[in-house]
Image (cartoon, coloured by chain):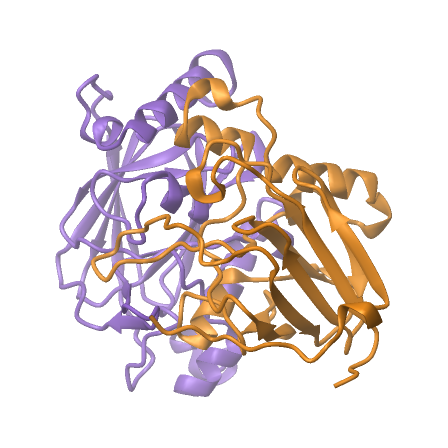
Chain colours: A orange, B purple
Amino acid sequence: MKLNRKHSALRPGEADFRQVIPAGEYWIDTVKAGRTLRIVDLEGNQAADTLFFNAADVAERYSAVDTIRAQGNVYLGCGSKLLSTAGNVMAQIVADTVGRHDTLGGACAAESNTVRYALDKGTMHACRDSYVLAVAQHDELGLSKRDLSHNINFFMNVPVTTDGGLTFADGMSGPGQYVEMRAAMDVIVLISNCPQLNNPCNAYNPTPLEVLVWDADVQ
Amino acid sequence: MFHEIHIDGGKHWSMTLRAGTRLRIVDVNGGANVGMLFYNPQNLLERYNAPDTLKCQHTFKLTKGHCLYSDMGRIFCSIIEDTVGWHDTVCGNANRELVASRWGEKRYQEYRNEWTQNGHDAFLVEGGKYGLGRRDLAANVNWFSKVAAAEDGTLQFDPDNSRAGRFVDLRFEMNSLVLLHTCPHPLNSAAEYPRRAVALQLSKAEPVAEDDFCRNSRPENGRGFANTELYLECGSGGAA
């Protein structure tokens, strides 16, 4: 299995911003061009459902389909350029201790949970509800449900088979694993720390994530 | 009821189709690509969701037996027949820059109906007729196009996936706004801009039986049909 892994030289103690995101909660903030964002899987196999918007024009946003088509590969790893709906590079993965992340599976939603698991799961918490709350509580950004599209699932392993199947494998992440990206434009980053309780991928145990931001490259 | 509409290659079209309608899309000359998006006409924020469609059915390709899901856990349409076998929904569209770099831009001024339209702009035009804009676009279906992923995830476009006369039948399970274009697939590397016509054949579908193939192809789809039937019977998903 080909994995694009690379360790970072950045030191957590020198980060300009650090925040733990508990499972079931969201984090939304602007990361300026040139700054580095790290997402840490503190306890392992936790999904970080992540969206990006151009801070100067939020109608331009992360595009999963343009990203995978342009790189000619369905998986994200170190070196992957995260493209927007307009074909611009929003950020690039510059360090990654896991080497493979999903952008096909989308975020969990209360409504899709009824289909995937059982009709009575429709009132359980889900990433899409965190997204909707995030944009409602930050309406100064001009975002709404309309802007919530296909995301990246950092730390999720969703292998595609050569005959066209989609499988949900045990994660390849673990405690302390991280992915790091450098913003190529001013981006609004929206992360839902996935609250999913129905999927064995996180051992039915959602755990915290941490985000770190370095204002300048100190390598 | 039977209507046939011919759509040349490199063009676009849209219509709100009622629940219970069957749409057959025929690849007239072989090698067609039909980009398609779906919206709920009663709530345009409810749109086709490719990730939900794939993960609910544990599939990377679309073919007979699959249902196309909205982000609200409901089914816009089911694939009730398919003589192709593999349709893509993860590669999106070509835009103007991609078309120009691959085939050269043929502007309308010089080429009239033979201009090189692209799928991204085609969706903006058709969606704009209903108040939709770039914020409303999503990962679309590319009917007749096959893109497989190798073991390491490398994407492989199959230029011989569809032949003349091949077709796919969609049965609409709720009222759906359909946007479509016949512009080239973004991974098609043909030497010339591929301009492939399709025929759209509209008729009334047979009612969905309890033993329906799509409803029973996976347990998830049984629940998807239950959600959709609730919406038809008690919500606003049915009759015009």
Kindly identify the residue that appears in the image at 66 percent across and 37 percent down: A24
Kindly identify the residue that appears in the image at 55 percent across and 69 percent down: A97
- Where B237 falls versus A130 (above or below)? above
Q: Position of residue A9 (x, y in %)?
A: 69, 80
* Tag count: 0
Q: Position of residue A182 (x, y in %)?
A: 69, 74
- Where B139 falls versus A136 (above or below)? below
- In the image, B82 versus A139, the foreground residue is A139
Residue A189 visible in the current orientation: no
- Name the quadrant containing residue A110: top right
- Name the quadrant containing residue B29: bottom left
Q: Position of residue B24 (x, y in %)?
A: 23, 44
Quick one: quadrant of the C terminus of chain A? bottom right
A63 lies left or right of B153: right
- Name the quadrant containing residue B188: bottom left
Residue A195 visible in the current orientation: yes
Seen from this angle, which residue lies furthest top? B234
Q: Position of residue A183 (x, y in %)?
A: 71, 73
- Where B13 falls versus A100 (above or below)? above
Quick one: quadrant of the N terminus of chain A? bottom left
Kindly identify the residue that appears in the image at 40 percent across and 75 percent down: A72
- In the image, A115 versus B111, the foreground residue is A115
- In the image, A134 versus B215, the foreground residue is A134
- In the image, A64 versus A45, the foreground residue is A45
